[in-house]
Every structure is written in C-alpha cells, then in structure tokens.
Image (cartoon, rainbow, N blue to C red):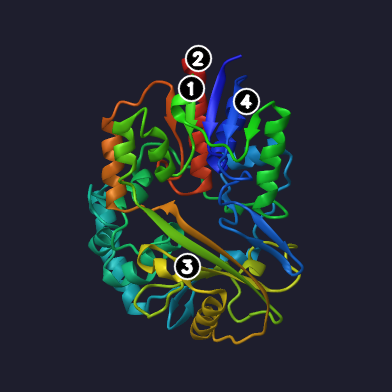
Amino acid sequence: MRTVHVIGAGFAGLTVSLRLAQKGFQVELYETGNRVGGLLGTDQTEHGIAERAANALIRTEKAEQLFQELGITPSLPLDSSKKRFLFRGIPKAWPLSFMETVVTIARVVPQILLRGKKGFKPQAGETLQTWGERHLGKIPTRFILGPAMQGIYGNEITNLSASLILGPIFSQTKKGKYKGLLTGPGGMQDLVNHLEQRLHELGVKIHLNAQIKLEDLQGPVVVATSAKAAAELTRVRYPSIAQVLSRIQMSSLMSVTLFFAKAQDKFKGFGCLIPRGFDLKALGVLMNSYIFKDRDKTYNETWILGGSKEEQLLDLSDTELLKLIAEERFRILGQKDSLLDYRINRWKKALPYYNLQLEESLADLQEVELPKDLHLHGNYLSGIGLSKILERSDLIAEKIASQHE
C-alpha cells in the first residue's frame, strides 16, 4: 500500500486525507498542535455555542456529499438569515438611496448589453476598489462591494486583488446555483469530530504535536498548512518554492461572541456588514440566533474585527475589547444590553491576505516547477472558503491517485 504524508490537520489536511484514504492510500497525517481542525472549532457554553472561526460551509454538492458520507444531519439556515444588513448610519437591507440606485443601474446595464459578462472581468494587478469604481461607481463600491468583500476576506478592498477574488466567476467552469449554508447541529466541531472519527476508521495515522521535516519524508507529500508554515517546511529541500511562499502576507482576525440577557429584535437577519469611513473598528456582526435554529439558549452575536490595518486590536485586553464593542454596538444597532458571557478568539497572522502581493506570488509559484511528489494545499491557493478547499482536496487526491496507479 502506497503511503502519502499530509502535513497540517486543518480542514484542508483532514479532507485531503479522507479522500486519499478512500482511494486506498496509507495516510500519515501530521499536526504541530494538540488537536485537529485548525481554526475550526466550537466552544460549548451554558448559554449556547460559540464558533471559533467559520460558522458554516457554502452548501455545494460536494459539501452535501461530505456531510452525507460522514453521517452528519446538517443544520440549515433559518428563513430569517436571508435578510442581511449593511450599515449606513443605521443597518439597512439596501444602503443606496433611490437616485443612487438608478444611477448605478444606468451605469451597469449598458456595460452588460454592450460587453456582456466578459466586460466585467478584472485586470491583472487591479484592486477590488479600482474594479468596483470602474464598473459600479464609488458609492456602491463603498457601501456594498467593500463591506461584502471585507466580510469574507477580513480586509479593506483598497488592496484586495480583484483578479484572485472575482476571477473565478469568469472561468469556464459551470457553477451550480447557490443553495445557502450548512453546518453541524452542534456547530463546526461536529464536522471536525466526524472527519477525525472517519479517518481513524480508515486507518489514517494522526500524529499530534509532531515536529516534522519535509526532507525526512519519502513519497508523495501534501503540505496542507498556512503559506508561512509551508515556506518554512520547504526552505531546505525546495528553497525556490520557499522563497515565493515567504512573500505571501498573512492577516490577523478576531471573533468575539457575546451572549445577552435580552434579544436584539429590531434587526433580525444574518448580520450587518460595516463599511469603512465611519470611524468604526468592527468589520461586521453575525446575529447567530437568527441564522441557525436550536443552538442557543440565549440571544448571541459574533463580532468580527482585525485585518492588516487593525492588527493592534488583537493586543487589547478582554475588558478593553468588550468596552470598544459595547460602544460600537450602541452606534450600529442602538442597543445597550446586559452581557451574560463572552468568548474571544484571537487569530494572529492566521489568514492569507488576498492582496496584490498574493496575486503576484501565486503567479510566480506557477513559474516554479513543483516536484512530482510535492502538493501544496491551503486557503491561500484556491480561495478562502471551506467549500473551495474541499474541492481542491478532491483534485489533489485525484492527481496523486493518477500518478500512482
């Protein structure tokens, strides 16, 4: 039986290990930490659950298949989650005025009629802000595109790469209809636990607290880590690859889940995204109790902060951070409620910064000939979403299987 070594037991490492084991490989999975799952995890409290990072996957066909084969009954969003807010003085379902909407339509429709979808394809080296202002105008870019993208990528659009983020929309691959989200009944830890259990059943050997060197491994290796960790792992054996990976910048993010004695019921929806320019630090707030059912005993929200320009926020004490959020919560939602409990997760330099530097680095990485038995995997390569990582896990497993038939 052929052995494949997988380094990193986050979602990328777990899912590629699953697919490889299902294809008959002996998989050795190495993790430097004391648990699997990476950023994914769920804290259980007396008031309900608090997600450490992502709260769900996009409900693609592959995601549904994964849940089915793991025996997880997915928790699907409530109808209330369909409503989403953007802040412009107050949370609004649509932040543009009537005339601003008319002007935006008058700008976009002729472009569609004259050039079609291809006319919107981003240019190499173009930021999301430049792309948005070119096609949509400054106001919709600031109040719609900006907060929507920073809610996903955790950074302002001023330096985010339009090509990396929007480029896949213009690929020839047929995309399925968006069907919403799905997660485990007890949160994302359900998914991690089921993945770990299935790997054990398939004979995958999971090595926790492992200090592994790439040069000590023989045969196919999947490096399913952050770009920073991948650069360090490849430094000795593949210095040209390490040099490119080391240029990829990382960004910090923080999630703060707050449990309240009283429900906020003025704005019932998935959450509220917050454009820059209002002297507010928060990137957005998730209204968890209006997203998934039967998970909370009391009303709770998750506030998202961080990004490359606000790294110092992660150094605030719990008291300082809670005070800041209380002030911003009153400005945004108009609420002053008694806090029952909270959970703070600080992720320093944990996420790839999808900026122009990453666009350049990935282009350079394509110019470097990867060894046949080395496969890079992670959220800096195929998109930051878990469903995209799952797709790449399938592709890597298929590639390794075809090479070792």
Which residue lies under the disc numbered 1? Answer: 220
Label pair 1/2, CB-CB below 8 angstroms: yes
Secondary structure of the residue carrying numbered label 3: helix
Percent of width and height locating residue 64:
63, 42
Question: Which of disc 2 and disc 1 is earlier in sequence?
Answer: 1
Question: Gap between marks 4 and 1, in whole Å?
Answer: 13 Å
* Image spot of residue 249 (x, y percent): 34, 51
**Could you tell me which secondary element the residue under label 2 belongs to?**
loop
The dot on residue 404 is 2
Which of the two labelled residues, at mark 4 and mark 1, occupies the earlier sequence position?
4
Q: Assess disc 1: are there few (<14), some (14-19) or many (≥20) residues with their C-alpha within 10 Å of its C-alpha.
A: some
Q: CA distance from mark 4 to mark 3?
A: 39 Å
Judging by the rendered image, the residue that carries numbered circle 3 is 314
Where residue 256 appears, as percent x and y from the top left, is 57, 69
Front-most of residues 291 and 8: 8
Residue type, mark 4 in image: Ala
Using the image, tell me which numbered label, if any, was put on residue 21.
Answer: 4
- Amino acid found under the numbered disc labelled 3: Leu
